[in-house]
Amino acid sequence: KISVEIAMPWFGMDIGGSLAKLVYFEPADFNLEDEDTELEPEALYKIHHYLRYNTAYGSTGIRDVHLEVRDVTVLGHKGSIHFIRFPTTSMSLFLDMVKEKKLSSLADTIHATGGGAYKFEQDFKEIVNMSLQKHDELACLLRGIHFMDRILPNECYYYKNTDAFNSEASEKVPYDFRDPYPYLAVNIGSGVSILAVYSQDNFKRVAGSSLGGGTFLGLCCLLTGCETFEEAIELASQGDSTKVDKSVRDIYGTDYNRFGLPGSVVASSFCCMGIKEKREAASKKDLARATLVTITNNIGSIAGMTALNEGIERIVFVGNFLRVNPISMKLLSYAMDFWSNGSRKALFLQHEGYFGAVGAFLELIG
Ligand code: ADP
């Protein structure tokens, strides 16, 4: 039976520019038959039941069941951590749900991070009478990364045998992240933030870019008429970016040997689209692929230069841009390796876009 030091339910939230992420701890010792209504008020049971026995919430909320972490001990309670996301544009639906499930009868505060913790603070107060306890998103991100890496043996991985043009060949390999410092954390959300991390408490934001996951999705919707991230990635996976971009070989007819540039390197992204016939020959799939490759290579290039500047070799890429997106992960892996002659390494984490929310959750439990 639970002795509840901090009122349940335990949540952490990260409200970003595109997606709101919610982390929920489900105690295994949550005894639904327990008659002690003081510890298990009806509202808690309802919230628990709603989250636990659904994988979709309303029309836009989704629980990433494959990311669920079981058998974890938090403040002496064994249980599971659940990962839920919904578009930030659905915040009013989320608030309706919070109201309907009477969450405010159980807690008066939600620990939250991300820009939305500021933007929606007033709405939480007015609509559901709850306060948002705001936490810095980059500090939460790192706290989340280190917590997850500590509790999960295979959280961190890299791609072996990456090849820019044969992405099938590469495979995922676990990476021991126990002694990671210093490393670069590249968070690819709507935009991009790059942190140099020297220890869990010693880090600085060293670079960023407005050309991020939001840019990919925005441009892809414009160019192909697609409507969702999943659709954009699916189109890109079937397309050929070399019909859209101009490579070194397209310009030189061969490699540019003097500076070690292989003919396959993109010399100019989207360059072919200035030519009428090529424009007419490019399919939506090709345009989606070229958009994905352009945005990914630009991020890779900034990450590589930042790593060089900071003298750092391990580069951890996170953020939901990498969700269901092995093309970008493999491209980043190849680029980090190639442009550093093998000295820099791209690393990835299974829980991609949820570390900020995990960090906010950890702020709640202390
Ligand atoms: P933010 O905190 O800025 O919302 P995230 O790390 O959640 O950042 O990443 C947002 C990006 O993830 C989007 O710009 C898009 O590229 C990608 N993405 C992945 N899945 C989705 C989805 N279901 N809906 C919208 N964007 C998604």
Image: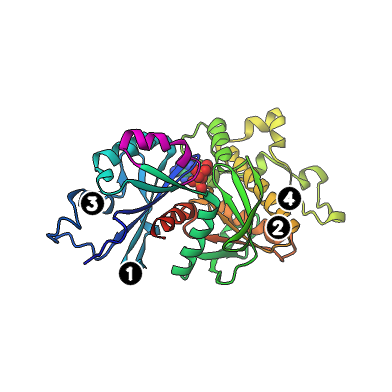
Viewer-proximal residue, 174 or 46? Answer: 46
- Quadrant location of the N terminus in the rendered image: bottom left
Q: Viewed as shown, does residue 31 lie left or right of 286?
A: left
Query: Which is in the foreground here, disc 2 or disc 4?
Result: 2
Residue for point 73% across, 51% down: 264
The circle drawn on residue 307 is: 2
Distance of label 2 from label 4 (alpha carbons) = 21 Å
Q: Which residue is mark 4?
A: 265
Q: Which residue is mark 1?
A: 76
Viewer-proximal residue, 325 or 363? Answer: 363
Q: Viewed as shown, does residue 87 lie left or right of 213?
A: left
Residue 20: image location, x then y, percent:
43, 44
Which badge, 2 or 3, is on the more N-terminal residue?
3
Query: Which is in the foreground here, disc 1 or disc 4?
Result: 1
Which badge, 1 or 2, is on the more N-terminal residue?
1
Helix, strand or loop: magenta stretch = helix
